[in-house]
């Protein structure tokens, strides 16, 4: 797909680091599968992967941790 941010680059399979913050929690997931623009580097995560990352963040928030850094593992 053509990147909607820069309008010039084509996206290719790659990975992203996703950082979410809510209240006292900082949640980081590394190696999240994403489409990455070859021109500007913008990262796009598909809806199913986003749902998994958000579920992981909810789990971390429920456990009461303040900082959690994880690697993404495909199901």
Image: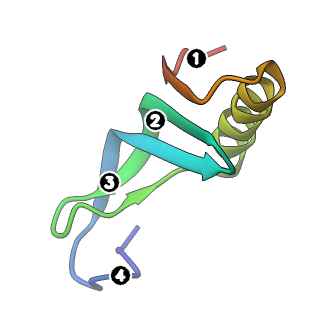
Could you tell me how far apart the alpha carbons at marks 4 and 2 are, in whole angstroms?
Answer: 19 Å
Label pair 2/1, CB-CB below 8 angstroms: yes
Q: Which residue is mark 3?
A: 36
The mark nearer the N terminus, 2 or 1, is 2
- Could you say which is closer to the camera, residue 51 or residue 58? 58
Q: Which residue is mark 1?
A: 74
Q: Which residue is mark 4?
A: 5
- For label 2, the SS is strand
Whether residue 4 is situated above or below residue 54 in the rendered picture: below
- Could you say which is closer to the camera, residue 74 or residue 17? 17
Whether residue 68 is situated above or below residue 6 in the rendered picture: above
Q: Residue at 15% across / 68% down in the picture?
A: 39
Could you tell me how far apart the alpha carbons at marks 3 and 1 are, in whole angstroms?
Answer: 18 Å
Give the quarter of the figure containing the N terminus: bottom left
- Could you say which is closer to the camera, residue 59 or residue 5? 59
Give the quarter of the figure containing the C terminus: top right
Could you tell me how far apart the alpha carbons at marks 2 and 3 are, in whole angstroms?
Answer: 9 Å
Label pair 2/3, CB-CB below 8 angstroms: no
């Amino acid at each position: 797909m053509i990147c909607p941010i820069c309008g010039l680059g084509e996206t290719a399979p790659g990975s992203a680091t996703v950082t979410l913050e809510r209240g006292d929690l900082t949640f980081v997931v590394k190696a999240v599968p994403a489409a990455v623009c070859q021109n500007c580097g913008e990262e796009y995560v598909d809806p199913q992967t986003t749902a998994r990352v958000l579920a992981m963040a909810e789990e971390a928030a429920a456990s009461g941790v303040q900082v959690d850094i994880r690697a993404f593992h495909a199901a």
